[in-house]
């Protein structure tokens, strides 16, 4: 690879750009700053740019104090002016890759970001795509946009894919101690991107191509989606068999080999697991292949909110109550424990279905602020004994550690627990007989 770029990386003189300062881009930017690099964050949202330069973080896993320190050190700045891309030696693209209205990949953010880089390409530049996407994106979408004016990847610039694997809210694994898979368009591209990332992560795992790296990420998330789909179906089957799914799963998990524990729930959420596998099935459809596991898991997982509402309706019915007119308190709206993120959260669908059936719905979530579903605004309320007592039923969707399960069991008339969160309060629950599990 280009010896000048190598020297600049080794000497921590290389200037690093991060394009897109969201859940993925901001932690990565902070890690480059910590490793001693000069980092510029390029971000289209002027509100985020202003907040970050003022030392305020909008990402749960990045404390504002870390952003403030980075800004004060002079090694981090955010900007909406992309001209500065001309001065960076390397840029990582961390822009969204949502699904469009027809649930096909929406590549517009990746294309816009690539065009912004292409207009400022220079010799020796390292470009790394981090956004989750279908196999072939880096070679088929980015490469043609970046290879301008006869510049060749692997010779004049370096292009690679390296999937972000961050697990929001995980206190053990962050950017630094999660190995980074890297696949370049050419071996020189893999080498250049690996050298750069080796300065910020403990271990780099090079693979033979950008497409292989893209596929690695999709395998990881498909693995989760399919296994969650499997245990969700186990829960549905146990329901019909009159068995306790959690008891069965816990006992199976006592096997020290050949079994990995996944737990059922109200459906899957977040920006990754519900969406990423569909990128793969979409790509495979274009090759006349049906990704059956992915589609089946998606069908089962996306039907779970309906099952939750049905189960609640039956439990209310047993108590001579209809869903229509019932006051329901939904505990936890974020898609998983102790995070603020509502994206794709199954709680949203559960609430929508409850409202459709005429329930009056209140929500409690210590991490999230007001949000809207359709035209209706929901403002989280504190989970107090009074709130619990006033509800006809309480539905546990997200098992935030801030909730007091004993209080929930003690003060509620009826609890539908979709996470087995009340297991610790089970003795009290058994006594009261007011807890129904998924
Ligand atoms: N959030 C996660 O836990 C996670 C984990 C692994 C992978 N990913 C993947 O990483 C990618 C980014 O996800 P995220 O969660 O950080 O999204 P995000 O929405 O939090 O952040 C993306 C940021 O990019 C900005 N942006 C959009 N277009 C831009 C452009 N042309 N130039 C500069 N900035 C632009 C947006 O304003 C936003 O701030 C996605 O492909 C996602 O699938 C996310």
Image (tube, grey):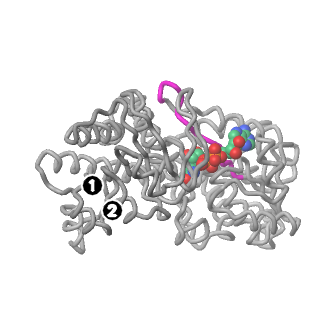
How many numbered tags mark residues here? 2
> Is 215 colored magenta in this rendering?
no
Question: Would you say 110 lies left or right of 52 here?
Answer: left
Magenta-highlighted residues: 92-103
Question: Would you say 192 lies left or right of 315 here?
Answer: right
Judge the density around disc 2: few (<14), some (14-19), many (≥20) Cα neighbours within 10 Å.
many
* Residue 413 position (above or below residue 110): below
Secondary element at tag 1: strand
* Residue 106 position (above or below residue 392): above
Question: Would you say 307 lies left or right of 221 here?
Answer: left
User: Residue 267 appears at what percent x and percent y?
Assistant: 37, 45
User: Residue 130 appears at what percent x and percent y?
Assistant: 61, 51
Question: How far, Cα to Cα, is label 2 from label 1?
Answer: 8 Å
Do residues under tags 2 and 1 come within 8 Å of each other at their CB atoms? yes
Question: Would you say 301 lies left or right of 37 here?
Answer: left
User: What mark, if any, has residue 422 been given in the picture?
Assistant: 2
Front one among 219 and 375: 375
Report the quarter where the N terminus lies.
bottom right
Q: Main secondary structure of the magenta part?
A: loop
Q: State which tag comes first along the sequence, 2 or 1.
A: 2
Front one among 101 and 212: 101
Q: Residue at x 77, y 60 (%)?
A: 2
Write down the quadrant of residue 434 in the picture.
bottom left
Res. 31 in view: yes
Secondary element at tag 2: helix
Name the outermost residue toward the left: 241
* Residue 323 position (above or below residue 135): above
Residue under numbered circle 1: 435
* Residue 1 position (above or below residue 83): below
């Amino acid at each position: 690879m280009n010896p000048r770029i190598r020297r600049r990386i080794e000497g921590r003189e290389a200037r690093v750009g991060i394009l897109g300062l969201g859940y993925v881009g901001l932690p990565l930017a902070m890690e480059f700053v910590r490793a001693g690099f000069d980092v510029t964050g390029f971000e289209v949202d002027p509100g985020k740019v202003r907040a970050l330069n003022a030392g305020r973080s909008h990402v749960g896993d990045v404390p504002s104090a870390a952003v403030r320190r980075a800004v004060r050190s002079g090694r981090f700045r955010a900007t909406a002016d992309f001209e500065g891309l001309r001065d960076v030696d390397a840029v990582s693209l961390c822009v969204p890759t949502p699904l469009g209205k027809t649930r096909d990949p929406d590549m517009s953010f990746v294309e816009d970001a690539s065009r912004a880089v292409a207009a400022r390409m220079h010799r020796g530049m390292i470009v790394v795509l981090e956004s989750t996407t279908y196999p072939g994106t880096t070679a088929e979408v980015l490469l043609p946009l970046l290879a301008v004016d006869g510049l060749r990847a692997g010779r004049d610039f370096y292009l690679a894919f390296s999937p972000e694997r961050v697990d929001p809210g995980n206190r053990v694994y962050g950017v630094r101690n999660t190995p980074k898979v890297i696949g370049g368009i050419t071996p020189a591209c893999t080498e250049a991107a690996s050298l750069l990332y080796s300065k910020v992560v403990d271990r780099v795992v090079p693979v033979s191509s950008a497409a292989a790296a893209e596929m690695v990420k999709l395998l990881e998330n498909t693995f989760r989606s399919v296994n969650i789909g499997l245990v969700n179906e186990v829960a549905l089957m146990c329901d019909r068999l009159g068995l306790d799914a959690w008891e069965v799963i816990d006992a199976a998990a006592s096997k020290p080999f050949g079994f990995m524990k996944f737990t059922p729930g109200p459906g899957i959420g977040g920006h990754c697991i519900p969406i990423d596998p569909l990128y793969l099935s979409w790509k495979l459809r274009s090759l006349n292949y049906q990704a059956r596991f992915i589609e089946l898991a998606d069908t089962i997982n996306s039907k779970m909110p309906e099952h939750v509402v049905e189960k609640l309706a039956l439990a209310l019915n047993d108590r001579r109550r209809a869903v229509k007119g019932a006051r329901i308190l939904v505990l936890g709206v974020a898609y998983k424990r102790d995070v603020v993120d509502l994206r794709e959260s199954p709680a949203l669908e559960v609430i929508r279905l409850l409202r459709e059936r005429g329930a009056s719905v209140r929500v409690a979530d210590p991490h999230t602020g007001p949000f809207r579903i359709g035209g209706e605004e929901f403002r989280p309320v504190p989970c107090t004994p009074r709130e619990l007592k006033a509800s006809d039923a309480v539905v546990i969707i997200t098992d935030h550690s801030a909730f007091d399960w004993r209080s929930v069991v003690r003060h509620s008339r009826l609890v539908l627990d979709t996470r087995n969160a009340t297991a610790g309060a089970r003795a009290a629950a058994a006594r009261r007989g007011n807890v129904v599990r998924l």
